[in-house]
Amino acid sequence: MSWRRSWALVRHELRALADDPGSVVFLLIMPLLMMGLMKPLFGLSLQAGGYTGANGAEQAVPGMAAMFVTFTGSFAGFTFFREHGWNTWDRLRVSRATTFDVMLGKILPTLLIAIVQFAALFWLGVVLFDLVIAGSLVGLGIIAVTFSLSMLSFGVAATSLSRTSLQLNTSVNLFAIVFAGVGGALVPLAVLPGWVQSVARLVPTYWAMEGFLDVILEGAGTTEILLPASMLMLFTLAFTVVAATKFRFEETKVYIA
Amino acid sequence: MSRPVLVIEGLRKSYHDVVALDGVSMTARSGEVVAILGPNGAGKTTMVSIVCGLRHADEGSVDVMGVDAIARPQQARKYLGFAPQELAIYPIDTVRQNLTLFAELIGLNGVGLARELEAVASALHLEHLMERKAAELSGGQKRRLHTAIALLDRPSLIILDEATTGADVETRKSLLELVERLAEQGSAVVYSTHYLEEVEAMDARVVILDRGRVLADGDLEALVTRNGGAYVDLVFDGPPPAIEGRWDVSVDGSRLRVTVDDPPRAVGAIFDSLGPARSRLQKVALVSPSLESVFLSLTGRRYEPEGQAHVLAS
């Protein structure tokens, strides 16, 4: 294992992202648009739920941020497919970089992007949509990081099960919507049917929203968000186990541009 | 005799019902060029993939610089430089960034890295292209960059799989010259190709691979002397005539093969013996002792680089 080798790969992946920044820009612009659209509706919903001072940003900002960070999680998977598309995957495997070096080099940039995405969206949520965070910013950060890890590991797990980039794209998009819908990111959980609320705990987005709302609305500190953070790490572990057992380095993957 | 850098013994590999390698054994020594010659589908890429740790063998052993490359591929790769058959460079990176990335993956940095980049760039005539994006290079330039990556840090074993595929004449010539220089500098170079003329142009030991088996392994001249034959091939419109003469003759459909010592000298007499059938003659080929005739002699088939079999009935 070599940090230097992983860092060389991280720099390469960041260059690839800089070469085609459209996706990253989209993942900042779209959630902001959705926040603006949904904020008034969420405001009414939160006020009806007893949060009389809420303006809707408390749900809109973390909800849209969480949903779009799920899409970001697929970036890590696409980097593997891109190697196959460029025929460089075998070259990378024959290099002196270990499996760990390669995985870290490919995954770390996506984690950095997800964290920066969260930070940017929350900051813009404060500036543009008057989001007020009652609790600990460190707690907010912990939820953002642990959720990012869970979505990243989900992206790699989806990659390990996908033979083509089209399959990866389809599965990630589908699960992003399902996680966001069932988890209470797309709309407040309280307005969803009872059966949805009962299965919501089974998706990572639910725990992210629990953590975010606890900090934003209830003024939670780092101790109070330990449960959602721990659950998100459990999801990370579960997805990682899937990825570790299903990922076949020798498998040829098909990149469809 | 120089030390063996690569030792392959009894390598077997099948993909479902297709036998790709059927007990392949060979060696490559430092300072030696070993040309693996065979038509498409012979098993060349499967063999180099196993040596590089990209595929698992069903049976057999691969030893690189004394390291069991099947059990410890990561250790074996320390001695290995590999240029795969398909072009494998990052189009979004510059030439320098491509080389730097792989040099850093080897473990080079600082002055050592800069020196190594300069060395391979010079060897592959890339010096003036270092800041150009790989996507903007010509086909030949891309192929040179692709090969340059394999040479970083002067590996003990360099494997070039179909290195000149898609290359222009100039690039092909310079790559073949480079292969010989690399061997002179002490590396063992394993060069796989389906082009006979490339092997004939190199000062190499030749391993002929066909349908997963090693048919011959030796010095080019010795192989041709031992196994190469000379003949005149005639193709007729309709069945070939029976010809009188002292020659060894074989027929396959409309093709008549006459084995002779000196085809240019014998062809006149052969024509004379055709009689009226001469008017039905469609094609004539004179084949002198060469790798092509070695392949024919060993397999009973014409050498078709793209892997089409043409079996002669003797």
Image (spheres, rainbow, N blue to C red):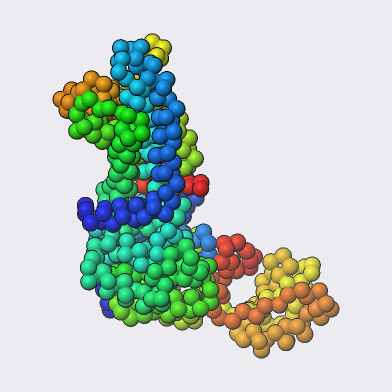
User: Which x, y percent locates residue B275?
Assistant: 81, 80
The one of A238 and B39 positioned closer to us in this rendering = A238
Task: Name the image quarter holding the N terminus of chain B.
Answer: bottom left
Figure check: B18 above or below A67: below
Report the residue at 32% width, 24% height from top. A58
User: Which x, y percent locates residue A205?
Assistant: 33, 26
Report the residue at 34% width, 16% height from top. A46
Report the residue at 71% width, 77% height from top. B284
The one of A116 and A42 positioned closer to us in this rendering = A42
Figure check: B166 above or below A62: below
- Does residue B130 appear in this view? yes
Task: Name the image quarter holding the C terminus of chain B.
Answer: bottom right
Figure check: B76 above or below A34: below
The one of B8 and A175 positioned closer to us in this rendering = A175
Point out the residue furthest to the left here.
A223
Report the residue at 24% width, 65% height from top. B108
- Does residue B88 appear in this view? no
Please tell me in which quadrant of the rendered image residue B96 appears.
bottom left
Point out the residue furthest to the bottom here.
B265
User: Which x, y percent locates residue B312?
Assistant: 63, 66
